[in-house]
Image (cartoon, rainbow, N blue to C red):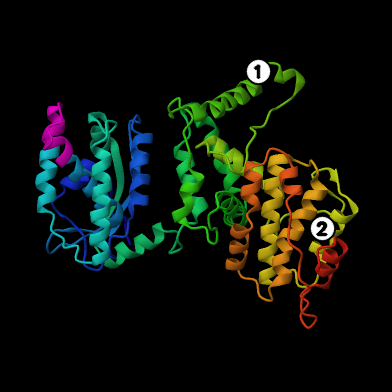
Amino acid sequence: MTDSSLDKGILTVGELLLDRSLAIPVYQRPYKWTTAHVHQLLGDLLTHRHKEAYRLGTLVFHRETEDGRRYIVDGQQRTVTLMLIVQALIQEHLEGHRLERNDLKVRLAELKTALAAFDHDFDNPLSQRNIRNNYLDIARFVARPECDEDLVAFLLERCQLVTFTLGDISEAFQFFDSQNARGRDLDPHDLLKAFHLRAFSLQDEPLKARTVSGWENTDSGELVTLFAQYLYRIRQWVKGRSARYFSKEDCALFKGINMDEVAHYPYVEGLRITHHFVDNYNRHYARNIDGQRMAFPFSLDQIILNGRRFFEMIAHYQLTGFHKGGLTLKAESLGGCRLSETAACITEVLNTYEGRQRTGDRYVRMMFDCLLVYYLDKFGTAELSRAIEKIFIWAYTLRLRLQSVHLASVDNHVLQNNLFALLRDATAPEALLDYPLPMLRRPDPRWNPAPGLLALFEKMHYVE
């Protein structure tokens, strides 16, 4: 592929949809965006509407010399959604006579003609269903008061897409693959990085380079583990939701509010006070004398603060000791707190028993780690030894009860005996420590997956 064969450019949404040569090739997959994707896009428009320009993504085209059409190789889902939004704006604002600005009337009238001439049959039942459902959802959005002339102008004139147009179809697909990490789909944490970098406030812009450097210097596998095995599952289980596999569809779980843009809702004020107090404390001249620094008091189930605070939060939880093999547990102490004899024995057995590397055992250990970290996140080291004992019995009952433990087994165990939800509403450690757990029925002597585990259950009097 030569540079001369690649045409690069930037188009506004209005310019893109006025292009009469735009076409969707027959080989493209069905339109699969759901209302969840649409809500995310519309939410981004509201969040960034005051910016001079906002990038919505990248489009890759193949220009066919014979018919002059510009076929969408990558970006069909977003483009079709933008068509639906503009069509809804035409119906609500132009035909509904809600516009006062003549330039917007002219532009929407031009777009009405262009969209009417767009020739593509969405004959796939999945495409038809998603188009219908998404359009109805969009129509409800554009009828709301906040979808005013300023937002219409922002979408058509200041929302942009980076475009790459190639004349050879094979080169177009090759370029598409290279733009998607050499054929590898982006991990959810990569998408979150891009989202939260865009959410940096103007005063935080000087910190971007340092933030990106810190993120890039972190092993990607460690980030995958932190998000997929721990942060995602804790945040889901706390809400009583299944948490088996973390995917791009779950990224919204780690998106929240932009502190400088969110309205003064009552629920935000506590976060706003803390956000500004921490910054003002750390910037005060007295810090040059006493050398003190205050960390933001993050919590695992809190509302996410977009931008800088998100990266600070991830760095904070990286320090908890999570790694690919699980939470780092020391035999005698944790978090500077000396453990009781029983709790120390538990940590020793968990670190050493034969079979701990089996897939099912790793799932159970992950569940144990998640609840222990959630406890530490809420109550620190208060009554930590008793908490370790309780969490051990709760988690490893599953290991001793089942001959084969799968991820679904762990997920179901949490949701049926949800101590995460119990801790969420707890005001003191006793809510967990006094929670009654069932006794373990003695396993068949012909099957004993881990004698060390069973011996601990017997020592703690949890075996019938």
Quarter of the image where the N terminus is located: bottom left
Q: Amino acid at mark 2?
A: Thr
Q: Is residue 286 visible?
A: yes
Q: Amino acid at mark 1?
A: His
Relative to 337, does residue 28 appear above or below in the rendering? below
Q: Residue at the right extreme?
A: 341
Q: Nearer the viewer, residue 390 or 255?
A: 390
Q: Please report the residue visible at 71 percent of the width from the left and 44 percent of the height from the top.
A: 431
Query: Which residue is the site of mark 1?
Result: 284
Q: Please report the residue visible at 69 percent of the width from the left and 42 percent of the height from the top.
A: 377
Q: Residue at the bottom extreme?
A: 446
Left or right of residue 144: residue 290: right
Relative to 4, does residue 410 appear above or below in the rendering? below
Q: Please report the residue visible at 48 percent of the width from the left and 43 percent of the height from the top.
A: 255
Query: Which residue is the site of mark 2?
Result: 347
Q: Please state the extent of the stretch shown in magenta in the rendering.
A: 91-106
Name the spot of residue 114 as percent of width and height, x first: 12, 48
Left or right of residue 363: residue 429: right
Q: Residue at the top extreme?
A: 285
Tag 1 and tag 2, C-beta contact below 8 Å: no
Relative to 433, does residue 27 appear above or below in the rendering? below
For mark 2, give the secondary structure: helix
